[in-house]
Image: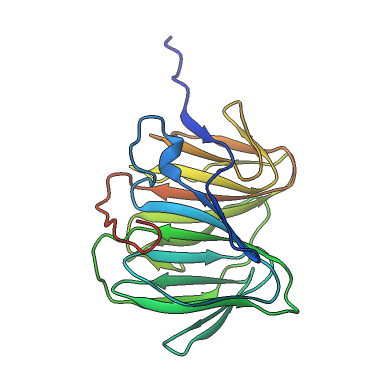
Amino acid sequence: MESESPPKLHKAPRTDVSQDQGTFRIHFNFPGRNHPDHDDHGYGPLATVVESFMDPDTLISMHPHQNEEIVSWVPAGVMRHDDRQGNELVTDPEHLLVMNAGSGFWHEERTLAEDPPLRMLQIFVRPHSLDLEPGIQHGPLDEPVANEWRHVFGADGSDAPFTVRNDVDCYDARLDGGASVALPAISGRDTYFYVFEGAVEAAGTYFDEAESGLLVDPDDLTVTAREDSVLVAFCIDPDAPVTRQGTIGR
């Protein structure tokens, strides 16, 4: 009997691409760099996953985005958003913010002096077409269930609670130490995951906090938490048509 081939799992260490603006610090994770034979820093429509830190009493003043979908995922703390459409929104562990920037969207972000230090992910998705209608989505997320994946957002037209305009579906999970889950999989897509907190093992490979994996041509793959952990996973169509003119994601 022929042995099964091992999963095509590519690991990337903690990123060394960072910007330090004092009270605002960002680390850029490029999913395309997980793959040794990939010549694009993004992976299909997933351009970059940015880990952002904001100290209390920090303002990122009004600025524009174009031709990218920006998802703000806040597992703890609060991120305050204002925009030129008159929205004043608070994103926290119970809420998600999606800016479908399209042809142009202006916003600012802030924390107040009484807010806790903020660590979040801002996820940049390349849309399928240029200069789409701009818009914003903000609302509650389903209550997370320990050791299960929660659907955070998906492709436009899907039944996901929030949508982006390309073929990326995002899930998160809070795992107890020792718990195992199957990595999310969608037919025809590859799966990228990021360890936001804790440490996990998959296919004999250890992933520490802020490390990531890319599973190509996915089959069933089990992820086991070596301690209490928080994971974010993306099911991506690597062949989806994309634009590369985003303000940041490109």
Q: Position of residue 114 (x, y in %)?
A: 76, 79
202 relative to 127 in the view: left or right: right
Q: Camera-side residue: 249 or 156?
A: 249
Q: Residue at x 46, y 90 (%)?
A: 86
Instruction: Answer above or below: position of 181 versus 142.
Output: above
Q: Horizontally, is 17 left or right of 143 in the view? A: left
Residue 159 seen: no
- Check the image and report above or below for 23 versus 27: below
Residue 41 seen in the current view: yes
Residue placed most toward the observer, 157 or 242? 242
Residue 56 is situated, as x and y percent measured from the top left of the image, at 71, 73
> Which residue occupies the foreground of this view, 60 or 109?
60
Quarter holding the N terminus is top left
Residue 227 occupies quadrant: top right
Give the image quarter of residue 222: top right
Q: Residue at x 29, y 56 (%)?
A: 244
Quadrant the C terminus occupies:
bottom left
Q: Quadrant of residue 248?
A: bottom left
Looking at the picture, how far across and down is residue 165, in whole percent? 33, 64
Say above or below: 182 vs 26: above
Nearer to the camera, 70 or 182: 70
In this rendering, position of residue 174 left or right of residue 70: right
Q: Which color scheme is applied?
A: rainbow
Estimate the x, y position of residue 223 in percent, counting from the top left.
60, 38
Outermost residue to the bottom:
86
**How many marks can you see?**
0
